[in-house]
Amino acid sequence: MSLPFVLFFLLAFVAVAGALTLILAREPIHSALALILVMISLAVLYLLLGAEFIAGVQVIVYAGAIMVLFVFVIMLLNAGVEERTDFSKLATKYVGYPLAIFLIIEFAYWMARSTIGREIATGTAANTTSVSTEALSRMIFQSYLLPFEATSILILIAIIGALVLAKKGE
Amino acid sequence: MDFITQHAVLVVSLAKIAVLLFVVMTALAYLTWFERKVVARIQSRWGPYYVGAHGLLQPLADGVKFLFKEDVTPPAADKFVYVLAPFMSLALALTAIALIPFGPSNLLVLGQPVFVVANVGISLIFLFAITSIGVYGVALAGWSSNSKYPLLGGVRSSAQMISYEVSMTLSVVGVLLLAHSFGFSAIIENQRGSILNWHFIPQIVGFLCYLTAAVAETNRVPFDLPEAETELVAGFHTEYSSFKFAMFFMAEYANMITVSSLATILFFGGWLSPFPDSWTFQNFLPALFLLGTAAYCAFDTVVYMRGIARLQFAVVTMLAGGLGTACLGLAIFKPEFMPYVMGPFWFIAKLLVFMFFYVIVRGTLPRFRYDQLMSFGWKFLLPVSLANLVITAFVLIVRHG
Amino acid sequence: MSVVPISWYLVLSAILFGLGIVAFVFKRNIITIFMAIELMLNAVNLAFVAFARAHGQLDGLVFVFFVIVVAAAEAAVGLAIVISAYQNRQTLNIERFNLLKF
């Protein structure tokens, strides 16, 4: 029971607990907090997998900026308690939930059983050195330069779109 | 004994954390004393004077007051988030201090560096990640109080923090271009030499942008409209009382210490001394400073103090004198131990200069209006940081072919 | 084995993705549904990073970088749309947005 295993189980437990809180919480702000918890535990998992820069980007951009956007919208729209569904309650309780649980178990089962998963299970994962940011940035700016420029244009479009939508709402 | 050498990492880390926690908590308390004294002197009054000699026991009295005040919770507040927000703020602010190197990281005890708790190669990214999450403490505090003024103050505070965080991150990238690494040890090593090698000379624009963005990021004057007492009642911490309010207070000062430490490390050489290493007289500087303080305190004790304050100040004199003599003895008889003393000495000296700057700015400048604040952040500071980055990159490419 | 096998990370990614789908289908608040989409994107990111480590190549990490950037742009525009929708219907219950229903 060495440290990587203990850490992995702890983080996996926190991530799944956060996802369950997202589903079961009654107030949207609690769901948002649960999602932030999931993102931070995933960032630590990335650190375990040796991707330091990606872990940093995940926390700074995803958990620290995108989720702040979500929290602002929840606070400003004063999204209240989750309402009851119009659909049949019996169908939700006796058909919906069992099917949902079956879906999750099926995903996990086939992922664990797949040959791809097992083939690479003990492959070069034994190499525990971290990825250097320089190698990653070389790849982004040399092999993947076109997608990089395309995403910068995408962000520009998103900024303009958000501005237009915000103005029209007044 | 065998247990200690086998689990050296754990034992040394726990010891470092304990020492650092104690030192940082005391420093936070006395930072409030320092600020009240300096702001008072700027305003031609004395500041705390009665509680101990020169008000030195005032933080203790404030701590006792905060502990014994009644803890009022607004009735319709969201209990979980209401309690979570100050804890989150303080925990994140204190976690950031674990990354800061107070001295050289090659000085080891039991194989572990002495002066830094977490010596990682990505310190800078980690610190910015902690700063990004710190926004939630403010936003959630405003929301969970279930009241108009805190909500408005919380939303404004957090919007200000995320705006200036972008400029803060960009103004630091120039230093990264010069140092080729994210780790604090590597950035400080790149500034070795004398004061002429420090990064604030080639990156003066980046330094000024960083300082402005850091003052805005920590919600200090002149950027503290969302929490000023004359404006939105008290902003996001209106509905908090006693210990939770004290936690917000401590979190703000801990954030100040963190961003000042970052400025020191990135632009002013961290724990390096401004004089070249060959000038050996600098070994006597801590002793000089401490003995000078002891002399001033001795003069004050004998001439001005009366009663119990005289006793307290005599104790302070003896403490300062003892430490000064110890440093003097160390400098004369055992110079090989001096790196253990000089590193933290220079780091804390530079940190105090930045704290002094923060407090002087608080006492002198009026505050920005909120729309002036936001337009300054987005329309001036962000383009200047970006221009600094582009020009730095351009100059580096031209110089190195 | 002294390292955690990669297939365990993939199973965790699958579980999180399944939970994201369940949240997407069962919740009524638009913002919560949006957050379920972000959860699914995060699960996929975890799978990418795990594969990048398994094959020893950095392309997975580059993909994660781009997914995070695209998710940021999507969240910004999506939330602007949600705000406009709220200003039109005064509710965030997705079952009230049924004007185009047959």
Image (cartoon, coloured by chain):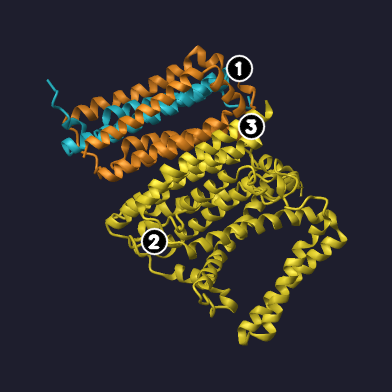
In front: A91, or B149? Answer: B149
Q: Residues within 10 Å of mark 2 (few under 14, many from 20)?
A: some
Image quadrant of residue A62? top left
| Tag 3 residue | B396
Q: Is residue A74 left or right of residue A55?
A: left
| Tag 2 residue | B228
Q: Colour of chain B?
A: yellow
- In the rendered structure, which amino acid carries the disc numbered 3? Leu
Q: Position of residue C52 (x, y in %)?
A: 55, 20
Q: Residue furthest right?
A: B333
The span from disc 2 to disc 3 (Cα, nearest Å) is 43 Å
Q: Quadrant of the C terminus of chain A?
A: top left
The span from disc 3 to disc 1 (Cα, nearest Å) is 41 Å
Q: In the image, which is nearer the foreground, mark 3 or mark 1?
A: 3
Q: Is residue C15 visible?
A: no
Mark number displayed over residue A123: 1
Q: Which chain is cyan?
A: C
Q: Is residue B338 left or right of residue A93?
A: right
Q: Mark 2 touching mark 3, by CB under 8 A? A: no
Q: Residue furthest top?
A: A115
Q: Position of residue B269 (x, y in %)?
A: 67, 48
Mark number displayed over residue B16: none
Image quadrant of residue A157? top left
Q: Residue furthest bottom?
A: B307
User: Same chain for marks 2 and 3?
Assistant: yes
User: Same chain for marks 3 and 1?
Assistant: no
